[in-house]
Amino acid sequence: MEAQRTAAGSARVADGGSLDLRSRARAAFAVAEVHAAAVDAQARFPTEAFAEIRKNRLLGVMVPEALGGEGASIAEIVDVCYLIGQACGSAGLIYAMHQIKMACIVRHLHGNSALERILQRVVAEQLLLASSTTEGQGGGNVRSSEAAIVREGDHVTLAREATVISYGIQADGLVTTARRAADAPSGDQVLLVLLKSDYTLQRLQSWDTLGMRGTCSEGFTLRARARAEQLIAEPYEKIHAQTMVPCAHLMWGAVWMGIAAAAMGKAQAFIRNAVRQSSGRMPPGAAQYTQALSSLHTLRSVLASALQAYEAAMADDRILAGLEFQSMITLAKVQASELATATVLGAMRACGLSGYRNDSDFTIGRHLRDVLSGLLMINNERILANLVTPSLLTPLPSTVGD
């Protein structure tokens, strides 16, 4: 296996691969942090951060070693998302979205040689993959597609109105949902993996938002023609339950936790500075800092528990598809986004006006604007409404230990 590793794989030392991956992630963190304010202010792609991410060969780390990657675990990727999210919310979210799609391809590959070649190119060329699951009137309902795959011999074509494709122009490829065929119902979906040469994008709408401005999540008309082998054979329903949902909620949650941790770092520095300047007296915001720190620890526990449950269930399709697991992992997203928001708000209140100002060393404005996106990505109200019926069928605990 060692002989099959590329430069990316050889970068991880035999006994300390995770440590080496973290050190490379910290290098990306350092660059992303320097440029985060400019990325936000100019609503531009985090070019410098992704140059460093590519330099440290972080885009293909999940690819199996046999295909030139490093076989990084979901837990390792979640940690990288957390680190980069601390530095720049937009860069962290883009990295997370790329890795969510990588997880879908890697987990459901099943020996598809065309997709194996794409994975090898991701590693060798450090390609960045975007996601196209939001479409037309369906909005954020990723389990419904309007546009359908059309088969033309050994090729397929697709034309869809994608209301959001994050970093679509900057990506080297994308992974998109579609109806299996023109006569298929909207929920009978497939996942198609495309490289830049396979499609064109025509801009439909711009991206001028409160936060996550650097994700450049514009809308496009997507027109694609690719080889039929670039379709993942597994039904999207299965991919969605086993990989898409758990990885999305864990990796997004890690980014939001990173943003919250960065805000808390500023609040901690503010409190310490205030104590020094007032001969040891605690400032008024100290109590808010304590509450926010508690929220951050709770957030970490939620994500750690969900990650542990996913890792334990990954080999069991029955558990992954079950109501209990799907409800838990989905509610973890709701809890993570709300706890992250509460943490950042608490950090701002701990800093008082210094946290509210944009021209302060302790400003938390960007962190607050970025973290609010977590409440709206797959809208929390929609998630909770969808869970009402299945939750009514779930038995209530009979003891404290249940």
Image: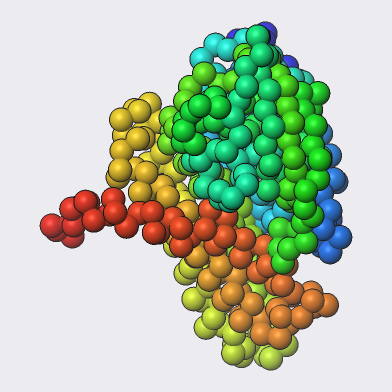
Residue found at x 35% / y 28%: 317
The answer to whether residue 58 is seen in the rendering is: no
Could you tell me residue 273's position as x and y percent?
Answer: 71, 80
Relative to 394, is 279 above or below?
Answer: below
Asked which colour scheme the image uses, the reply is rainbow
The answer to whether residue 153 is seen in the rendering is: yes
Could you tell me residue 278's position as x and y percent?
Answer: 69, 91
Near-viewer residue (292 or 342): 342
**Number of labelled discs?**
0
Q: Quadrant of the N terminus?
A: top right
Could you tell me residue 50's position as x and y percent?
Answer: 79, 41
Near-viewer residue (390 or 297): 390
Left or right: where does residue 150 sit relative to residue 142? right
Residue found at x 64% / y 77%: 348
Could you tell me residue 279's position as x and y percent?
Answer: 67, 90
Relative to 340, is 183 above or below?
Answer: above
Residue found at x 40% / y 42%: 308
Residue found at x 52% / y 58%: 379
Near-viewer residue (204 or 230): 204
Relative to 363, is 4 above or below?
Answer: above
Q: Which residue sits furthest left? A: 398
Q: Quadrant for residue 307, please give it.
A: top left
Q: Which residue sits furthest front? A: 183
Left or right: where does residue 179 sit relative to residue 327? right
